Amino acid sequence: MFKIVRTALPFIAAGLLVGPLAHAAPPAHGAAHSQASSAKPVDPIVTELMTKDLPDIAGKDVLMITVDYPPGAADPIHRHDAQAFVYVLEGSIVMQLKGDKAVTLTPGQTFYEGPDDIHTVGRNASQTQPAKFLVLLIKNKGAPAVLPVQ
């Protein structure tokens, strides 16, 4: 499985950057989460691009999404019961997993979350500029993409 991911991931990301994703329209108004008051961070905007069964890996599928962080946006603490591969498209984001140091990522940089990792920080590094990243999630077929952590 990892050989498939290592071999295919750069080609998928490159194809997306020069293909339809580079010319895609912004998400429809209804796709955005409601904006919260200034006391709470702005919600990210998640757009599902594709879901595909992985016939060579029994019981698994891949979910491809983009996450748009408006200025000041942040995620709640969560985890993915999946292998999550992140590729920054624009702006600057801060990511941190439980027990690790926070990292700031810029366009072209990558980040990985394993199925047991708790994502404690996920936010736009800027209060004035938007950020956007692509995520590939290899997960159990039909499983939710995000699991809240109490």
Image (cartoon, helix red, strand yellow):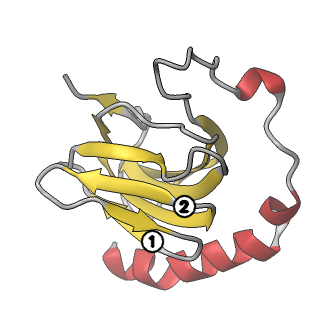
Which amino acid does the dot numbered 1 rest on? Answer: Thr
Q: Earlier in the sequence, mark 2 or mark 1?
A: 2
Q: Is residue 54 visible?
A: no
Residue 56 found in image quarter? bottom left
Relative to residue 110, is residue 148 depicted above or below? above
Classify mark 2: helix, strand or loop.
loop
Which residue is identified by label 1? 110
Q: Is residue 138 visible?
A: yes
Measured as percent of width and height from the top left, residue 47 is found at 66, 40
Compared across the picture, whether 5 is left or right of 120 comes to right
Which residue is identified by label 2? 92
Between residues 114 and 51, which one lies in front from this camera angle?
Answer: 114
Compared across the picture, whether 27 is left or right of 32 comes to right
Residue at 53 percent across and 70 percent down: it is: 106
Query: Mark 2 to mark 1: distance in Å?
Result: 12 Å
Quadrant housing the C terminus: top left
Give the mark toward the camera: 2 or 1: 2
- Near mark 2 (Cα within 10 A), the count class, few <14, some 14-19 or many ≥20, is many
